Image: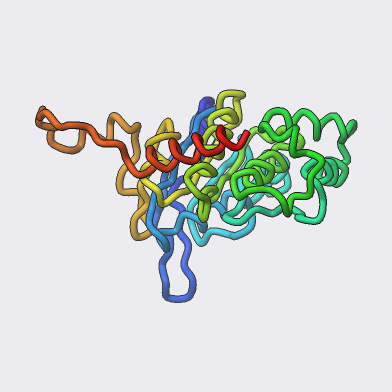
Amino acid sequence: MTTQSVIHVQGLEKSYKTLKVLRGVDFDVARGSIFALLGSNGAGKTTVVKILSTLLKADAGTAGVNGFDVATQAANVRESISLTGQFAAVDEILSGWENLVLVARLRHLKGPGKIADDLLARFSLTEAGARRVSTYSGGMRRRLDIAMSLVGNPPVIFLDEPTTGLDPEGRLEVWQAVRELAGKGTTVLLTTQYLDEAEQLADRIAILHEGRIIVNGTLAELKQMLPPAKLEYVEKQPTLEDVFLALVGAAGKEQR
């Protein structure tokens, strides 16, 4: 692992009986960056995350997180990371504030109330903090889920398809939360099957296909792999997402 690399993966292999899921995966993630692992369903993205978070053992290869080997120093790795899975792991009976306090107490941290207040403010949830999570929108639950992952300030966070099932507004809320994470120095490994998500968020993008990384680079580097675009005049039309967000935003202002 280089001095600038906080996640290092080399030659990672994993099979389930006769099914080869990972066939020699290699990549590095720079400290404080957003790295997107892009691939279709079944490409092996979640398997990579499970190995890096010590939930699964690789058949071959090496992996390190924050300077610790995932196979031989699992406890140190777990102290360095947080994992947000594909579905929000929040308690709907509790309020947002109570969810955060609970996690802080489970981690034996001092001042759990202050920690909860700070994270609610950081993720624009202060006004909703006293409400039961069952009343939250999908985007709010996801933001709370990510906030809970940050209790204790782990230097590395894994986000496994964080916007699955969210509406356009919820996706944008989560995107903003992820940008703020990296802006404050957290290293983010993001798995997604959404091309626009990787394009919007990632400093580097690796495409995982049939168990192998077939390309790894910045968005600009990946675009250079295609022939240069021809310059043509095209009247730009609003996308469906533009229309949806404009109408919903206007309706919300009228209700206020």
x and y percent of residue 108 in the render?
A: 88, 41
* Left or right of residue 75, residue 7 in this image: left
Q: Nearer the viewer, residue 2 or 212?
A: 212
Identify whether 183 is placed above or below 162: above
Identify whether 235 is placed above or below 136: above
x and y percent of residue 21 in the render?
A: 43, 64
Q: Residue at x 32, y 40 (%)?
A: 239
* Left or right of residue 121, residue 47 in this image: left
x and y percent of residue 190 in the render?
A: 50, 43
Q: Nearer the viewer, residue 28 or 172?
A: 172
Q: Residue at x 54, y 32 (%)?
A: 176
Identify whether 163 is placed above or below 222: below
Q: Nearer the viewer, residue 53 or 225?
A: 225
x and y percent of residue 25 in the render?
A: 41, 50
* Left or right of residue 30, residue 78 in this image: right
- Quarter residue 232 falls in: top left
